[in-house]
Amino acid sequence: MIAETGLAALWLAAMLAGLQLLLAWSAVAQGNDDARRLIRPVAIAQGVLTGLAMALLILLFIRSDMSVYLVAANSHSAKPFIYKFAGAWGNHEGSMLLWVAVMSVAGAAVALFERELDRRTHIATLGAQAAISLGFYAFLLFASNPFKRLDPPAVDGQGLNPLLQDPGLAFHPPTLYLGYVGLSVAFSFAVGALLTRAVDARFARAIRPWVLAAWIMLTIGITAGSYWAYYELGWGGWWFWDPVENASLMPWLAATALLHSATVLATRDALRAWTIMLSVIAFAMSMIGTFLVRSGILTSVHAFAVDPTRGSFILALLGIYIGGALALFALRVHTVNEGARFDAVSREAMLVVNNLLLCVILGLVFVGTLYPLLTEMMGVRVSVGPPYFNAIIGPLAIALMAALIFGPLLRWRRDETGAVLRRAAPALIAVVLALGAVIAFAPRPVGWLTAFGFAAAAGVAVASIAPLWKRNLRRTPLFTYGMVLAHLGCAVSLAGMASESAFSQERLAAARPGDRFEIAGTTVAFDSVMPIAGPNWTAMQATLTVSRNGHVIGVAKPQARFFTDPPTPTTESVQMTRWNGQLYLVLGDALEDGRWQLRIWWKPFVTLIWFGGGLIAFGGALALVGRVRRGRKQGRAAATMAEPGAAIPAGATA
Amino acid sequence: MKRSLILWIPLVGYLIFLGIASLGLNRDQQTTIQSRMIGKPVPGIELPAASSSNPALSTKEMADGKPRLLNVFASWCVPCAAEAPVLAQLAREGVRIDGVAIRDARADVDAFLARHGDPFQRIGLDARSTLQFYLGSSGVPETFVVDGKGVIRYQHIGAIGPQDVDTILAKLREAEI
Amino acid sequence: MRRALPFLLLAVALAAPIHAQTALPPAPYADRQLDDPALEAKATALMHTIRCLTCQSQSIADSNASMASDMRSEIRERIARGEDPEAIRAWLIERYGDWISYKPTAEPILWPLWGAPVLLLGVGGALAFRRIRKHRKGSA
């Protein structure tokens, strides 16, 4: 009964989405007052129903109901509780249901909490959200029904690949989904605003919390995914420019650009058309990412739930929604006037530089990712990999960091070049000092890109806290702290990247128990290697004692593991984290005459890469809380005023 | 007018992307890497004997006037065992087959031949995939058709199934001319 | 998207290529560094840009596949003999095509790839620049 209830809830929700679209049309196009009143309860009911469907699917997984096809194919009664729970979305159908559920719950939230927009635009937005949802309901109900029954029921499930049972993995996909769905809300706002020709600062203030929330989730997702690849693969790399990695990076780049352009629009009422365009691009990138991963169109080692027919479905949705939005853009955007004017030396101008660089990077990641597909159709197979991306994206990223040094120090509207340089002086001095230090003291020659990476990191670190200078720290708004932390996170992460690429040390050894190795002032003693067994694997486990200046600082036990079902060898590397870096230890193959392959890396300050990512996300979270609070306050103030949506004083926003 | 045309550019660009994506989605995805050495002479490499019963292989001696197959295999490779009966059938029909055992040991190759038959004239032991790299081969099993002048004429990737026999024979006949 | 699941599958794909692995120990320089750090650095840099043949999307420097380790050994030995990294790349491309090099070559078909940054920066920069100047004129 649970499965049938879930399916019925989904159908009902889909019908409500259809109704919501009709009501929105009736309200916006014909000014129907009944429709206007009905639409919010409908949106909320739809959110409740899909939320229920998702909860029921999770319940089926927890109860290991083997009469449901999806459970039988992806779960096992003996699986730990947490993986039964997370198993609900660890497959194509479940993950699509999660997508739809998050989307309609977000739609309900828009219906409930949105106060910024005028009612007409609000309703048009809800209509757009319903239209997008309808496509995904169709995908779910016609092409990937998660509640399909299995008759007769399976005795037990086929289990989940043991490798997929990882706590990080369990909660990684929902994180990214929240990001994608947040961008879908921004997209709906953009379509709604285009429809009612209400592209203004209020629109920007309405989308900003959604974009911020989405961006935080994407930041967390990418940071976690990168760390995961780093420890799971056992080769010390943390970013490979694989198509699937790029697919997750592209929406983030677009969201980052959107975040900044929305700030310009909210504060200065400029960049109207551009912000609309970015809202469309950001959601397009989310869907294109989904498409690239699910369709298997590109060769990727990360291929997940690959199925060309699903690919066709997603491609059709992409054509309808993004194509439709772009057509609407072309038809309507000339009615949007360009907005306030600004000078070449102003914060707006620097944010335009930020947007330009982010979009060029986005374009190049997009082109580089898809180029092999294009040449393959012309009969030539090529690879575009790290050498291309690093060489092209690296300098652009450093230019972006240079813009980041100046951006927050510039005033809105107009500024004096001399004054800006004076304000940026400490940061510029930091740049010069860091560059000099790297050239003078680096233990080995450093490439110019890495050297500039260090310099930019130092400059951004100093510049990022400059907005707090000479300010009453207790009266500084929360979102300013958020911005400061997020920018500081960029510097921290960049420093980690530069340090990892410039100063990593590698030691490959064919070792016998009893051997000792020196790496970066640390001694690694290979004590023993022993077979051990786990629940569904066997392994050879090395015991390595790590010491420094004669003091033991830790014992590492890397494994060469072999999972029995399905037969899969894996490498269980060990990372020993010190304040100044990580020692990365891997046990490789057995060699002749009782020796073992050991791979040891010393990666100075590598953890800063992910720590910086975390800082960026945390800064985003502070900004989000700050914005929502401020929005509430202003909402209350506006309610008492005759004219809602009065412009915020220009200096007040960061 | 001009400005309004510019506004359509994003949509046009996007439609081009959709076109490429849908073509790409419906294409036959190649997963194998074709060797670029077809039409070029077999690189001259001398390999030691891989088994107790077959002589060593020097690819320099392949230009002896008659076409032959050069089969890249390994005793540890499952599809290689699957194609063994087909190779045996080809050998019975008079096709000359030389083998290259990749990353193998003599005892293992002996056991493999004892179990699956020995269609090979010479078998070279390529302990570190060297000849494989020279050939532009990317896995096992693969089979090259080499003509009488020692020039590679055709590459078959994967196990030769009964359905591939005609193609292989035709390529061998072509190589005779 | 969905990097998470893919990443684990990546681990599987890397660790267990469809082709069975040989029991033979790895080639001598598969995981042994060259004594000369300068030569080793050259070899490592090259290995990170050569695509593994048996895995789907990894460089030979990041792969456990036996063919990748043989190729690492081949590259280290060639570098030790004094060969130029780019000559080794060319040698591999001659056999496997451009596909094997992660670094796009100078083939005409790849020119647009190198032109793209210039084009995007140029067009984007021109659009942004024109806007600012126009505004200034308007406000002056």
Image (cartoon, rainbow, N blue to C red):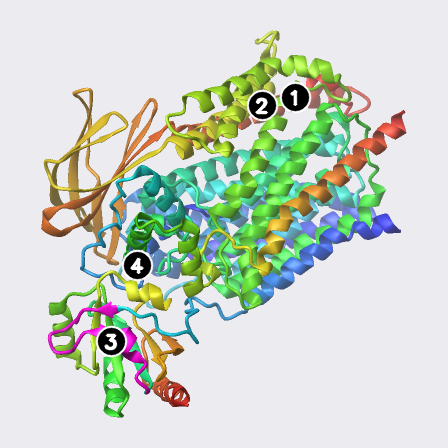
Q: Which residue is mark 4?
A: C67
Check disc 4: other Cα within 10 Å, few if <14, some if 14-19, many if 20+.
many
Q: Which residue is mark 3?
A: B99
Q: Are marks 2 and 3 on the same chain?
A: no
Look at the image and say whether residue B47 sits in the magenta stretch.
Answer: yes
Q: Earlier in the sequence, mark 2 or mark 1?
A: 2
Decide if residue A164 is on the left or right side of residue B123. Answer: right
Q: Which residues are magenta?
A: B46-65
Is disc 2 placed on a helix, strand or loop?
helix
Q: Position of residue C47 (x, y in %)?
A: 37, 49
Q: CA distance from mark 4 to mark 1?
A: 54 Å
Q: Which residue is mark 2?
A: A483
Q: CA distance from mark 2 to mark 1?
A: 8 Å
* Contact (Cβ within 8 Å) of mark 2 with mark 3: no
Check disc 1: other Cα within 10 Å, few if <14, some if 14-19, many if 20+.
some
Q: Amino acid at mark 4?
A: Met
Q: Position of residue A647 (x, y in %)?
A: 77, 23
Q: Which mark is residue A654?
A: 1
Tell me the quadrant of the picture where the C terminus of chain C can be found.
Answer: top right
Residue furthest bottom in the image: B93
Q: Amino acid at mark 1?
A: Ala
- Magenta stretch, main secondary structure, is loop
Is disc 1 placed on a helix, strand or loop?
loop
Q: Amino acid at mark 2?
A: Met
Q: Pick the residue in front: A425 or A169.
A: A425
Q: CA distance from mark 2 to mark 4?
A: 48 Å
Q: Position of residue A38 (x, y in %)?
A: 70, 44
